[in-house]
């Protein structure tokens, strides 16, 4: 079980939609995630996740390394 501490997490201001924020926040909390990890945890289809991940990467919020996505 993941513990919750009192840290405040600041999301980038240019993340517009709730889904984009959710994907970014999940990657941040998991300290990196694969598409399969995100599909399982968020119950979102790959066709929904891939454009979000592409957009986050294009805007330098995340980066793909060794098959997983990590926050920059």
Image (tube, grey):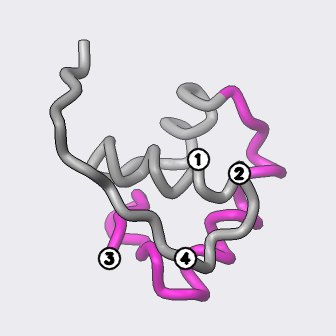
Let me know if residue 61 is in the magenta part.
yes
Say whether residue 4 is left or right of residue 61.
left
Q: Position of residue 41 (x, y in %)?
A: 54, 27
Let me know if residue 49 is in the magenta part.
yes
Q: Quadrant of the N terminus?
A: top left
Tell me which corner region of the image, top left, top right, bottom left or bottom right, holds residue 55.
bottom right
| Residue at which label 3 appears | 72
| Residue at which label 1 appears | 22
For the residues labelled 3 and 1, the Cα–Cα distance comes to 16 Å
| Residue at which label 4 appears | 13
Part of the protein shown in magenta: 43-72
Q: Are marks 1 and 2 in contact (CB under 8 Å)?
A: yes
Local packing at callout 3 (Cα closer than 10 Å; few below 14, some 14-19, many 20+) is: few
Tag nearer the camera, 4 or 1:
4
Local packing at callout 2 (Cα closer than 10 Å; few below 14, some 14-19, many 20+) is: few
> What residue is at 69 percent from the left and 27 percent from the top?
43
Task: Return the disc, 2 or 4, that comes first in the chain's sequence.
Answer: 4
Q: Secondary structure at mark 4?
A: loop
Say whether residue 36 is left or right of residue 54.
left
Q: Are marks 3 and 4 in contact (CB under 8 Å)?
A: no
Local packing at callout 1 (Cα closer than 10 Å; few below 14, some 14-19, many 20+) is: few
Tag nearer the camera, 3 or 1:
1
| Residue at which label 2 appears | 18
């Amino acid at each position: 079980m993941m513990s919750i501490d009192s840290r405040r997490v600041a999301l980038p201001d240019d993340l517009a939609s709730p889904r984009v924020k959710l994907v970014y926040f999940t990657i941040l909390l998991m300290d990196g995630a694969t598409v399969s990890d995100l599909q399982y945890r968020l119950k979102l289809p790959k066709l929904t996740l891939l454009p979000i991940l592409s957009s986050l990467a294009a805007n330098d919020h995340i980066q793909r390394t060794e098959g997983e996505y990590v926050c920059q």
